[in-house]
Structures are given as C-alpha cells and as structure tokens.
Amino acid sequence: MSMQNVGRPTRPESPASDADAPFASLTGGRGLLQDEPLIFELGGWTKTGVDLPAADADASDLGDLVRAEPIGLPGLSEPEAVRHYVRLSQKNHAIDLALYPLGSCTMKHNPRLNEKMARLAGFADLHPLQPASTTQGALQLMDRLAHWLKTLTGMPAVALPPKAGAHGELCGLLTIKAAHEAAGHGERRRVLVPTSAHGTNPATAAFVGYSVQEIAQTEDGRVDLADLAAKLAPDVAAIMVTNPNTCGLFERDIVEISRLTHAAGAYFYCDGANFNAIVGRVRPGDLGVDAMHINLHKTFSTPHGGGGPGAGPVVLSAALAPFAPAPWVTHGSDGLTLTEEAVGEAAQAFGRLSAFHGQMGMFVRAYAYMRSHGADGLRQVAEDAVLNANYIKAKLADVMSPAFPDGPCMHEALFDDAWLDGTGVTTLDFAKAMIDEGFHPMTMYFPLVVHGAMLIEPTETESKRELDRFCDALRALANAAKAGDTERFKAAPRLAPLKRLDETLAARKPRLTWRPEPIPVAPAPLAAE
Ligand SMILES: *Cc1c(COP(=O)(O)O)cnc(C)c1O
C-alpha cells in the first residue's frame, strides 16, 4: 500500500494471496476503472492549465502582503482535471446508479424536473441582499412552500432557515428553551430521549445545554409509557421522539405520549426525519406535536449524501410559534418582505439561526416535488414507501430474522443478526459482501437497541424489479453464510478498490489536511509550460 506523505492510503492493498483476490491487475486498475491519487499528488507544481498574460509586477496594492511563496496549487490541464473528477465520481455509489438502502436516510430518486426548476435563472441567480421588490417570485415560493409544510403537518407555523435535520433539532430546542424562559421556567433543563433515537437527538439536547435521559423501549420496539411517565417531572423541558421510530415502527401510543408530556408542562419535539412514511396520511399536529423538523432532502427528494446541502424546516405549534427565529415571509401593502428584525410580533424570537433565509435551491426542489405530486401523489408516496419496505421484510423473513416479526413495518425493514448465529459471519461481514454483489450496504448496527441491526429503507421510488434483484442478492448471500462459506464474507469486499479501512481510527483521528512535500522549484511564469 502506498501512503501519501500525511494522509490515508490512496491505493488499494495489494492482495495478500491469490485466495484474497482471484485476479489482481498490475497497476491497481480494475476493469476500465483506474486508480486515482489525490489531485495534489497528480499536479505538477511547475505547470499550469491556463494561459494568462504575465502579471505586471507593479500592479499590486497589497504591499508586503503579496505572496512570496509559490501558491502550491496542482497544475492540471482541462482534460486532466475533468478526468480526475470523473474518476472520483465513479468511485462513489449514487442513487442514480442503484438502490441505496440506507435506513433512516430516505435515499430516493431526485426527479430531474426539480433540478431544472432550481436552475431557473430567476431562482439560481438571485443574491440574498437584493431588494425585496426584485425577489417577489422567490419570496412567494418560500411562502407557498411554508403553506404546504404547514398544511401537510397540520401545524400553524414553520421556520425555514435550518439547513439540515440536526440544525432543525437545534432550532426546535432553542425555540422550546425560549418559550420556557419566557414563561419563567428556565429550571426545565432535562430532555427525555428514547433508547432507539438517532444520535443527533441527544447530541442536540446536550449542545443546547440540557441533560439527556433515556426512555426505555418495550419488547415490541416502542416507547415504554410507564417509564416515560415515571421520568416526566417539573425539570423536564421536552421529549424528543421519532415517529415512525428508527425501528421502522409507528408509535401507537403517540397521542398518549403527547398528553403525558403536556400534562407535565414539557414540550413534544418530534424528529420528523421519517415523515416519508406518513406524509399525506397523518398530520403530526393532530398528534400533539409542538415542534418537528422536516428533512426536505429526505421526504421531499432534494439530493443529499456527502454532507449536503440539505434543509430542515421546523414546523411549530401555536404555543411555540412566537419564539421562532427570524426571518420569515410577511405579506405587506407593497408585496412580500422578509421580516428580519426581532421587534413587534418577532420580539420573542430566540434570535437568528443562520445568515439569510435558508437553502433556496432546496426550497425550489422541494416545492417542485410537492407540486408535481399533488396532495394525492404525496399520500401515495407514503403508501408505496411502506409497501416496498414490507415487501422486503416479507421476502427475506425466512432467511434473515426481522427484529420485530409481529405485524407490518412502516417505511423500513429492520433485521437483527440472530439468523447469523453460528455462521461465524457478522453484520459487518455481510454488509461488506453486499458490495461485491454490487449493492450498497444497508444501515448497520443502528438503531443500537437491536443486536447487529440491519436497517433497510427502499423508499417508494424502487420498482418491483429492483426490489427483487436486491432481495435475490441478499438471499443468495444469506444462504452462502448458512452453508459455511465464511471465507467469502471474511475477505469481502474483494472487488472494491479499498478493503476494510480502520473506520474507528478514521472517525476518532481524522486526517483532514494534506500537507505538501516542500514545493520543489518555483513555478515557471504563468502561461509558460
Ligand atoms: C437523518 C436523520 C436525522 C438528521 O438529519 P440530517 O439532515 O442528516 O442532519 C435525525 N434523525 C433521524 C431519525 C434521521 O434519520
């Protein structure tokens, strides 16, 4: 394995033996896919891909701030740069390539119509500081989007600025904190979170300065009502409950959960990341929810993965609405404006969550998605997502072990690793073997409450044919594991460019910078090759 001077391995491990890889190319290439180093390792410092006239030595006003050292950017020609990024893109799995079964992520198709709308110059070329008189269309779109979000959730207010689900959680908890403080209840500093919660829930509560306490889960994967009731007390600020929960199950007692919470003077924050399973069928406002983020990049199909961009608007109950952060769209005599100042009706806002108004490109995509589906289409989204997950659960139930076998699931099928007992194969081994079969693994080891969890969310945009291909591959692998073909799993992935990386080390001690070797010689003057 070759290492560049500071960072990660950049080339595949050469196979240790013939058993590890039936065939190894001489160069690390695979089929028509070449190995690809970092762009800095590619570029010669001494050349440039652009022709610029030589700089006038006297032209700078920067005085002694003028750069004395070479800038150290890789010099690539256009075809070299294009190939670099296209090769990197081939190493990525993408929803446009195949099913992306990550549970709790709602990786669905991103309709091209949305992309086309987001690129309309009237949206894409706006600047956030433009006068409102020139941005009426964009403001109207935000207003219409807000209307749809409020209607679909049955909630009276929405804050559009949050830029991800986790950011929405922050927005919701800061709103709840502001409401408690305004009511003279700053002593409420504890947040209750079920054991199956997504990690962002306790992390957000801790970030806001709250202490976090877990609520136990029942045998059938739901919130333990007795445990919740016992833990609700005058110092509890809020509960954070995901519905459908991360086990892919609807919280049947959700109305009772909200009643108990309100009776204790706390607010009900609902993690709405799984809204896809109920959109158009259930209005969280009817269930007693006070605040809920909606991941536009999940339910409303805006692209995600690789860290963004996302958008996590938060719908709010009447009790919390006055504490929502600025800005929001207001109807005035001369059209629509963004209310930016914390005065008048906005006086109780906790402040701003981000510069400007939020992720405009995501708003356009989500709105285009809503309009092209219509109310009936959105309801069918939820129905088909649930149907697809149940299809997978049913098709694999005889070879794998569903974590909650009784009754149907919602939008994701959750398996545990009981069915692997005695095979010597772990959840991780199984997931790695899926890569060799051309499938991205499902979410593994989450939720934590299920041993060796495998969480599969197909979404509604997969056809029966794709679901069958996926299930056939998993069945074949399951049978191989049970037939004792352990070697297949322990050596997997054999066909991926990189084998098993030390993911713990990568997460705990990430190397995020690349430091160059000393730049050998000063670059030749620009334009000279
Ligand atoms: C995805 C997800 C989040 C976090 O959303 P981001 O947009 O990734 O910040 C929170 N909770 C659950 C249940 C999720 O699935």
Image: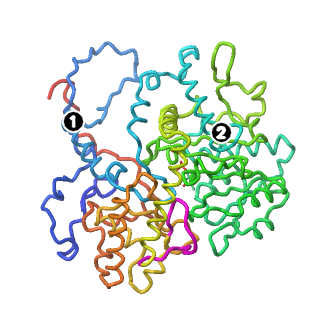
Magenta segment main secondary structure: loop
Residue 365 image point, x, y percent: 47, 36
Residue position marked by numbered label 2 in the rendering: 150
Question: Above or below — where is 282 with respect to 418?
Answer: above
Q: Which residue extends farthest front? A: 376
> Would you say residue 401 sits in the magenta stretch?
yes
- Structural crowding at the residue carrying mark 1, measured as other residues with C-alpha within 10 Å and reported as few (<14), some (14–19) or many (≥20): many
Residue 332 image point, x, y percent: 69, 17
- Name the disc covering residue 76, or none: 1
Q: Which residue extends farthest right? A: 184
Residue 155 image point, x, y percent: 70, 42
On whether ligand 1 comes within 8 Å of the CB at mark 1, the answer is no
Which of discs 1 and 2 lies nearer the camera? The answer is 2
Per the image, label 1 sits on a secondary structure element best described as: loop
Location of the C terminus by quadrant is: top left
Quarter of the view holding residue 439: bottom left
